[in-house]
Image (cartoon, rainbow, N blue to C red):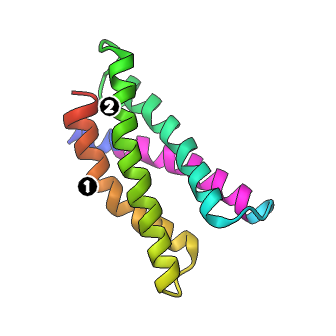
C-alpha cells in the first residue's frame, strides 16, 4: 500500500509538471491544445520516471538503460491512451479540455501506469 501511495504522490508531481507546461503553452502562448498537451505529457513523463526510479520503486540499483527502455515503452502507451482519450472527449463532448485531461489521466494512471511500472519497468 505504501508503494501505491508513493506512486500517487509521484504522479501528482508529474501531473503538476504536465499541466503547468500545458497551461503555459495553451493558455498563455496560444499553442494548439493537442500540441501543448503532448509537450506537457513529455515533461510529466520525465518527472515521473525520475521520482519513481529514485523514491517509489527503489530502482537505482537496477540498470538505468533497461529501465529507461521499459519506461519508454510504457510511456508510449500512456501517451497514446491519454492523447486519444482527451481528443475523443474534447471532440465528442462539451467538456473543457482540462477536465477531459484530468478524467483521462486519472483512469490511465490508476490502472495502466501503476501496474506496468510496478510489474515491468521497475521490477
- Specify the quadrant that holds the C terminus: top left
Q: Secondary structure at mark 2?
A: helix
Above or below, 109 relative to 1: below
Location of residue 71 (image quadrant): top left
At x 69%, y 65%, the residue is 32
Which residue is at a point 38% across and 17% down the rendered structure image? 64
Query: Which residue was labeled with disc 1?
Result: 111
Q: Magenta span covers which residues?
A: 8-26
SS majority, magenta: helix
Q: Quadrant of the N terminus?
A: top left
Residue 70's disc number: 2
Q: Position of residue 78 (x, y in %)?
A: 38, 51
User: In the picture provided, is 13 more to the left or to the right than 35?
Assistant: left
Q: Residues under labels 1 and 2: Cα distance?
A: 17 Å
Q: Residue at the location (51% across, 51% down)? A: 15
N-terminal of the pair, mark 1 or mark 2, is 2
Question: Relative to residue 19, is residue 11 depicted above or below?
Answer: above
Amino acid at each position: 500500500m505504501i508503494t501505491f501511495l508513493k506512486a500517487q504522490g509521484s504522479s501528482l508531481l508529474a501531473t503538476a509538471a504536465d499541466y503547468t507546461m500545458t497551461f503555459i503553452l495553451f493558455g498563455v502562448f496560444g499553442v494548439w491544445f493537442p500540441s501543448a498537451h503532448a509537450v506537457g505529457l513529455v515533461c510529466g513523463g520525465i518527472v515521473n520516471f525520475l521520482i519513481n526510479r529514485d523514491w517509489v520503486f527503489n530502482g537505482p540499483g537496477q540498470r538505468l538503460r533497461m529501465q529507461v527502455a521499459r519506461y519508454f515503452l510504457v510511456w508510449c502507451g500512456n501517451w497514446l491512451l491519454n492523447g486519444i482519450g482527451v481528443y475523443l472527449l474534447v471532440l465528442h463532448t462539451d467538456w473543457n479540455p482540462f477536465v477531459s485531461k484530468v478524467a483521462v489521466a486519472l483512469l490511465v494512471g490508476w490502472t495502466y501506469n501503476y501496474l506496468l511500472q510496478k510489474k515491468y519497468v521497475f521490477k
